[in-house]
């Protein structure tokens, strides 16, 4: 059986450091990651009511290729699916309800 491949970006790895003092949000992030690795493809998440419990939603306007999961009222995990539907980039953790996120902050590993 093939499962969704989770790929960390450099910007995600850098932004996760901001969660050091946010214990509940770190636990929520761990739950979301556990949820994601059990999925076969990204389209399974879009149609799954469990994803809504985690505050899963598509971003709007210039960021509509990105999706987010709610870690708290202000903190979001931003993800981006790959066109093949079986890979998912963990892009960034926004601690200011997207105000600290833009395309220029996304750094991929080479």
Image (cartoon, rainbow, N blue to C red):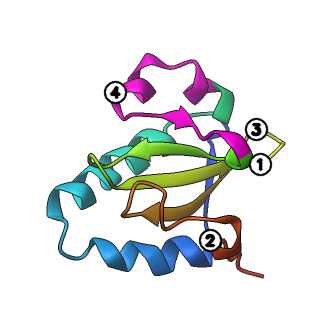
Horizontal side of residue 25 vs 89, given as left or right = left
Query: Mark 3 falls on what kind of element?
Result: loop
Q: Which residue is more in the foreground, 84 or 46?
A: 46
Specify the label residue 9 is tagged with.
2
Give the residue drawn at x 33%, y 76%: 18
Specify the label residue 82 is tagged with.
1
Query: Mark 1 falls on what kind of element?
Result: loop
Question: Residue 59's quadrant in the figure?
Answer: top right
Q: Is residue 106 above or below residue 82?
A: below
Magenta region, residue range: 44-61
Specify the label residue 54 is tagged with.
none
| Residue that carries the numbered disc 4 in the rendered image | 53
Q: Residue 19 appears at what percent x and percent y? A: 29, 71
Q: Earlier in the sequence, mark 3 or mark 4?
A: 4
55 in the magenta segment: yes
Specify the label residue 85 is tagged with.
3
Question: Residue 96's quadrant in the figure?
Answer: bottom left
Q: Earlier in the sequence, mark 3 or mark 2?
A: 2
State the CA–CA distance, disc 1 to disc 2: 13 Å
């Amino acid at each position: 059986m093939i499962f969704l491949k989770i790929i960390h970006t450099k910007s995600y790895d850098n932004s996760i450091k901001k969660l050091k003092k946010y214990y509940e949000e770190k636990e929520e992030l761990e739950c979301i990651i556990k949820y994601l690795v059990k999925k076969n493809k990204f389209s399974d998440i879009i149609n799954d009511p469990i994803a809504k419990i985690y505050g899963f939603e598509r971003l709007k306007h210039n960021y509509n290729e990105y999706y987010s999961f709610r870690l708290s009222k202000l903190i979001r995990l931003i993800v981006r699916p790959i066109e093949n539907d079986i890979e998912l980039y963990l892009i960034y953790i926004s601690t200011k309800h997207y105000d600290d996120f833009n395309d220029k902050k996304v750094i991929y590993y080479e």
